[in-house]
Amino acid sequence: MKTLWGGRYRGVTDELMWAFNASIAYDRRLAQVDIRGSMAYARALERAGVLPHEEVRAITDGLQLVADEFDRGEFRFAPTDEDIHTAVERRLGEMIGPVAGKLHTGRSRNDQIATDIRLFLMDELAALGDALRHAQSSIVAQAERHLHVLMPGYTHLQPAQPVRFSHWLLSYFWMLERDYQRMADLLRRVAVCPLGAGPLAGNAYGIDREALARDLGFNGVTENSMDAVSDRDMLLETLSWAAILGTHLSRLAEDLILWSTAEFGFVLLDERYTTGSSIMPQKRNPDSMELVRGKSGRLTGNLMRLLTVVKGIPSTYDKDLQEDKEPLFDTLDTLEMLLPIVAGVVETLQVNEDKMRAALVEGLLATDLADYLVRRGVPFREAHGLVGQAVLQSEERGVPLSKLPYEVYQAISPAYGPDLYAALDYEASVEARNMRGGTALEAVREQLERAQAILAK
Ligand code: ARG
């Protein structure tokens, strides 16, 4: 096998080693950004007076032809193409002759690949940001449609306090909003140009790195060439961002899976997002949400995979870093499917208001009864105990708190007045929580407006 480093070699690379070493099977996805980077680098060489205009013209025109071949799906890989960089350069040589060999002046595949993945990520993150926004919009739309619906809120999966369905749903909007912010923040660190770092020590041809960075749409340049060629923080951040986002979506999925069971029946997933069973005709399985839950494991695994690869490598580029691409691509591809699926499920979700109402049990109002006693001057800790006794009585007698006779309350404590029954009201409970971030109608409306304002930006 003829190689790039043929000069100092007498023999050939072992065949298995060749396959082991090659990354072309997956880094071919970087073709367009690799070519974009090369075109800009050729222009930088011209500005630095290293290559004359005609040669740079030949190189950039030739690169455009190579890009077109990729676009049309007509690019033919050769068995000697080790990675995307060598493939593009080889093809350029076939098209424009030996002048192609001048493109790599002062550049290394080390700063080249570091540039490629950043360019690639800038495009991908922008697209995923849009998909994330879309998922957020579907949440807001459903919340708005069901502003009034009450349901039991749970802690420890035990009925806790009544809440609005819209309030529950919007809780996921804010999780995804933090994910959006995290993405925008990490994008700032992605958009920094390492080109000109060379293999590790820098570029000896006097190229203007700032101009080169601007040409490629970066916001700035890296400050240390040794750091630049081996920095994969932006990938770790991306995988970490994706793992956290996946965790949020997994929790949403879990809520929806549970609530779509026959036992809960709070929601019904649209047919489009469920599947049947090959043997049990009655089945309508929430596979979409189960896969969302399952794929979060994959996203977390990809983060662990790269963290483990990076942790032991010594300064500057080592081939271990080639292992960065597959987890990255897998994570981006996973999110690309996952986000629209979640948006679709939420958008088409049927909400069963009656089932939610029927699940409201008076135990959910125990805190409100304690609040009632507090308003009558009883210290909260004491009130907690007095309501606990009432709950015990209601369980023993098999009647809800609102059907427990007044004498029973009186016997527990004279602090209970005849107006205690008014505290046992779901609507009143929810409306009492009228503060920013609370579940009262006005508070949820304001929350919804804030969410809408974010989406409108
Ligand atoms: N295929 C390599 C990678 O993905 C490109 C950089 C190769 N650099 C080198 N010195 N062999 O990391």
Image (spheres, helix red, strand yellow):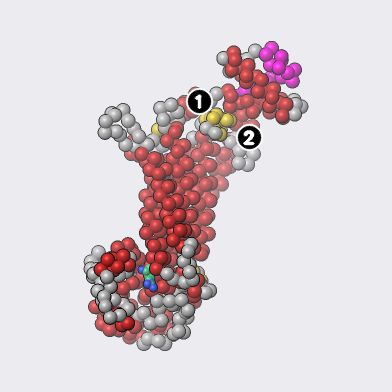
Q: Residue at x 61, y 29 (%)?
A: 429
Which residue range is magenta in the image?
Answer: 406-426
Residue under the image location 43 percent in, 47 percent down: 296
Q: Is residue 148 visible?
A: no
x 65%, y 27%: residue: 368
The amino acid marked with disc number 1 is Ala
Quadrant of picture, ligand 1: bottom left
Left or right: where does residue 6 sit relative to residue 222? left
Q: Which residue is mark 2?
A: 433
In the figure, 121 relative to 408: above or below? below
Image-quadrant location for residue 117: bottom left
Instruction: Give the number of the mark in front: 1 or 2.
Output: 1
Give residue 267's position: percent from left, percent from top: 43, 32
Mark 2 residue type: Arg
Q: Is residue 385 above or below residue 398?
A: below
Residue 230 is labelled as none
For label 1, count other residues whose C-alpha is less than 10 Å away and answer few (under 14), some (14-19) or many (20+): some
Residue 455 picture location, percent across and down: 50, 50
Classified by dominant secondary structure, the portion drawn in magenta counts as helix
User: Where in the figure is residue 365, as x and y percent of width and height?
Assistant: 61, 26
- The reply to whether residue 366 is visible in this rendering is yes
Q: Are marks 1 and 2 in contact (CB under 8 Å)?
A: no
Task: Return the x and y of residue 434 as percentages of the image width and height.
Answer: 63, 36
Choose top left, top right, bottom left or bottom right for residue 2. bottom left
Residue topped by disc 1: 359
Tell me: residue 367, above or below residue 43.
above
Mark 2 vs ligand 1: CB below 8 Å: no
Count of residue discs:
2
Left or right of 285: which side holds 308? right
- Label 1 secondary element: loop
In this picture, is 72 found above or below 169? below
Q: SS at mark 2? A: loop
